[in-house]
Structure formats: structure tokens, C-alpha cells
């Protein structure tokens, strides 16, 4: 159903076409809110690149793990960051992540990496490095970038900012439903909700760039919405915002 609507997005109005091609769309929100699905859809619908900033923190956490560097050891992490290259390769199913020349996409959803990403991301020096990489990636525009601080720190002047949220229980249960049958055997739904709350707590309460909506973000709470409803609402928000910025203000 989502795929059917894709081509209808191409705007016929030339100023709107130009704005859309160069647009920066920021999608922020807590874990499990559906950011990846919505960002991927918006990128495809509006013909933009989809960039998952969380995948970069995950790749760096994986590097720390395989290098034996503790997530709390800031000097060692900083040294490690100087020896690390991370590239995102956007495609229809998400981003492939290339860490030091090797595709590590398949390793980034392990619980230990998820937890590590949240832990390395509390350090301001690591965030500063990541933010500069992300700003380079989006410098030319034409991107949908999802994360925690895209609308507040990475692209405070983004054309559109959506803060996607949902109640923690709903986000946790959605995550549980996405697990493979084998993974679902290993864990109780309550455990998934508990882990998600712990990550929320850390992401929202860190001193540097805590997860919060930008003052000018549109908050989209999907607690009582279906995926199709969220997709339709997000499309409408982006279309309306891009139309506003394509008209020069008097
Ligand atoms: O979006 P994700 O679940 O892949 O993100 C993994 C972790 O990375 C998340 O718990 C916090 C961190 N993160 C961040 O601090 N800032 C971002 N822009 C994206 C992710």
C-alpha cells in the first residue's frame, strides 16, 4: 500500500520541486517510535536519501566492543574514533553500514550493540565527532535524517522537523512483535519494554543533546494510530511544510 503512493509525491510546481530536492527533513524520537519506517517511506516518497544516524552510533559501539574499549573510557574512545571510518549506504530497505571498509549491517541489532550505542552516545566528544560526520552527509540537502538530535543539534534549520513518539509500552510491544520467532522465544515482552525504558531514560537524561523535541518540531504521537495513519500524517506534514518554505515570505 505504501509503495503504490510513491510517485504521486513528485510536485508539479517548479519552486516546490527545487525545495523538495534540497530539503532536509529531521525525524527524531525515542527508540521504537517507528522512525526508521517513517523516514524510509518519506525518503522514497519524496525522492530523498534516507540516513539513519543511530546506525553510526551502533557501528562505533561495535568497533569499541571488538577493540576491547570500554563504553565509559572516553580517552580511549576518542583515540578509537580517530582510527574509525563509518559510511552509510542508503537503499530501499534501510542503510547498509560500512565500518572501516567492512559491511557490518547484520551485526548492529544485537542487544549488546544497541546498549553500547546508547552508552557511547552520552559522551560529548563522541557526539561532536558524529554530529560533524552527519552534517557533512546532509550538507547538500535532499535527505531525511532520523535520530535523537537531528532537529535540535545536527540540522537546527531543517526544513521539516517531526518528533515521532508513542507510549513506552506500545513501543516495547511493537519491538517485541518485530522479533524473529527464535528471538521472541528467548525474551519476555515485559523485558523488551524494560530495556526500552532504560534506553529512553539514558537518551532523555544525558547532559549533552538529550532527546527532546525541537521547539519548532511537529509532534506525532502514534500510540493510537495504525502505521498507515502515521505514514499519511507524516506525508501531509512534509508536503505542507515544503509548500510553506517554497513560497518566499514577504
Ligand atoms: O536510533 P537507534 O536505536 O539506532 O540509536 C541507537 C542509539 O544511538 C540510541 O540509543 C541513542 C544514540 N543516538 C543518539 O544519541 N543520537 C542520534 N542522533 C541517534 C542515535
Image (cartoon, rainbow, N blue to C red):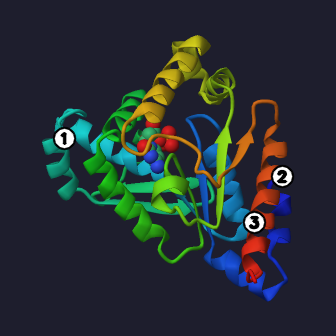
Which residue matches tag 2? 232
Position of residue 38 measured from the top left corner of the image (x, y, whole percent): 69, 50
Marks 1/2: CA–CA distance: 42 Å
Local packing at callout 2 (Cα closer than 10 Å; few below 14, some 14-19, many 20+) is some
Q: Residue at coordinates 75% horizontally, 36% vertically from top-left?
A: 222
Which quadrant holds the C terminus? bottom right
Local packing at callout 1 (Cα closer than 10 Å; few below 14, some 14-19, many 20+) is some
Quarter location, residue 8: bottom right
Which residue matches tag 1? 74
Question: Which mark is in front, 2 or 3?
Answer: 3
Local packing at callout 3 (Cα closer than 10 Å; few below 14, some 14-19, many 20+) is few
Q: Which mark is residue 241?
A: 3
Compared to residue 61, the image places residue 14 above or below, namely below
Q: Earlier in the sequence, mark 1 or mark 2?
A: 1
Q: Earlier in the sequence, mark 2 or mark 3?
A: 2
Q: Residue at coordinates 61% horizontally, 47% vertically from top-left?
A: 36
Residue 1 placement, left or right of 49? right
- Label 1 with label 3: CB-CB less than 8 Å: no
Q: Earlier in the sequence, mark 1 or mark 3?
A: 1
Marks 2/3: CA–CA distance: 14 Å
Quarter location, residue 237: bottom right
Amino acid at each position: 500500500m505504501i509503495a503504490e503512493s510513491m510517485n504521486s509525491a513528485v510536485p508539479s510546481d517548479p519552486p516546490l520541486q527545487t525545495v523538495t530536492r534540497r530539503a532536509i527533513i529531521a525525524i527524531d524520537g525515542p527508540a521504537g517510535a517507528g522512525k526508521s519506517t517513517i523516514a524510509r517511506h518519506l525518503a522514497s516518497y519524496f525522492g530523498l536519501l534516507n540516513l539513519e544516524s543511530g546506525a553510526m552510533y551502533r557501528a562505533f559501539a561495535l568497533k569499541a566492543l571488538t577493540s576491547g574499549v570500554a563504553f565509559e573510557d572516553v580517552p580511549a574512545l576518542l583515540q578509537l574514533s580517530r582510527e574509525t571510518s563509518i559510511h552509510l549506504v542508503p537503499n530501499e530497505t534501510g542503510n547498509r553500514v560500512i565500518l572501516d571498509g567492512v559491511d557490518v549491517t547484520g551485526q548492529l541489532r544485537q542487544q549488546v550493540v544497541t546498549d553500547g550505542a546508547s552508552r557511547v552516545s552520552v559522551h560529548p566528544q563522541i557526539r561532536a565527532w558524529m554530529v560533524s560526520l552527519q552534517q557533512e552527509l546532509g550538507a547538500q540537502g535532499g535527505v531525511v535524517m532520523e535520530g535523537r538530535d537531528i532537529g535540535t543539534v545536527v540540522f537546527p534549520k531543517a526544513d521539516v522537523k517531526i518528533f515521532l513518539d508513542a507510549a513506552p509500552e506500545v513501543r516495547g510491544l511493537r519491538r517485541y512483535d518485530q522479533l524473529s520467532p527464535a528471538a521472541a522465544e528467548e525474551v519476555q515482552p515485559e523485558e523488551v519494554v524494560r530495556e526500552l525504558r532504560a534506553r529512553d531514560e539514558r537518551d532523555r537524561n544525558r547532559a549533552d543533546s538529550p532527546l527532546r523535541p525541537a521547539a519548532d518540531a511537529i509532534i506525532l504521537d502514534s500510540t493510537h494510530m495504525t502505521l498507515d495513519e502515521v505514514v499519511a500524517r507524516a506525508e501531509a506534514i512534509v508536503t505542507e511544510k515544503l509548500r510553506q518554505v517554497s513560497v518566499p515570505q514577504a
